[in-house]
């Protein structure tokens, strides 16, 4: 009987008291970090040139064009693989 009483007390402590304690601890930690400047977001990089006009698209990066791979002239196709339907 004593085991079940201790088990129930621990269960309720974990279920109801632990979230409250964690919320208070994290709230305190976040406030402290905000005061000390711990969560600093770096400014966005400046875009060179004027902003695009409405309806226009601005492309910041254009990938290089890859050379097209050519198939050999004597290529007649791949190897034939027999298909079997699996039920």
Image: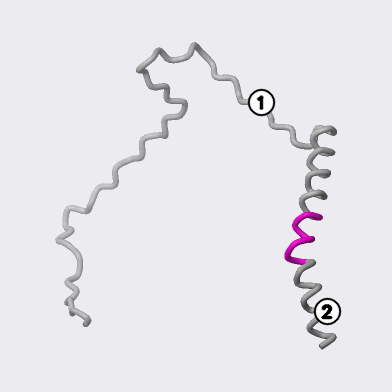
Q: Position of residue 32 (x, y in %)?
A: 84, 38
Q: Residue furthest bottom?
A: 1
Residue at image location 83% in from the left, 32% down from the top: 35
Q: Is residue 12 above or below residue 31?
A: below
Mark 2 and mark 1: Cα distance apart in space: 53 Å
Q: Is residue 57 left or right of residue 72?
A: right
**Which one is in front, 48 or 38?**
38
**Which one is in front, 20 or 83?**
20
Q: Position of residue 81 (x, y in %)?
A: 19, 74
Please tell me whether residue 58 belongs to the stretch shown in magenta. no
Q: Is residue 53 left or right of residue 29?
A: left
Q: Quadrant of residue 38?
A: top right
Q: Quadrant of residue 7?
A: bottom right
**Residue 26 — which label?**
none
Which residue is label 1 attached to? 43
Q: Secondary structure at mark 1?
A: loop
Which colour assignment does the render follow? one colour
Which residue is label 2 attached to? 6
Quarter of the figure that contains the N terminus: bottom right
Provide the residue span drawn in magenta: 14-21
Q: Position of residue 80 (x, y in %)?
A: 17, 71
The tag earlier along the polypeptide, 2 or 1, is 2
Number of numbered discs on residues: 2
Quarter of the figure that contains the C terminus: bottom left
Q: Quadrant of residue 37?
A: top right
Judged by its main secondary structure, the magenta piece is helix
Front: mark 2 or 1: 2
Residue at image location 81% in from the left, 73% down from the top: 9
Could you classify mark 2 by the number of other residues whose Cα lies within 10 Å: few (under 14), some (14-19), or many (20 or more)? Answer: few
**Which one is in front, 77 or 51?**
51
């Amino acid at each position: 009987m004593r085991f079940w009483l201790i088990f129930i007390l621990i269960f309720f402590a974990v279920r109801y008291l632990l979230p409250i304690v964690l919320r208070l601890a994290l709230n305190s930690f976040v406030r402290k970090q905000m005061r000390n400047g711990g969560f600093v977001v770096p400014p966005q990089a400046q875009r060179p040139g004027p902003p695009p006009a409405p309806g226009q698209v601005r492309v910041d990066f254009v990938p290089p064009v890859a050379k097209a791979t050519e198939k050999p002239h004597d290529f007649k196709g791949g190897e034939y693989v027999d298909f079997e339907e699996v039920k």
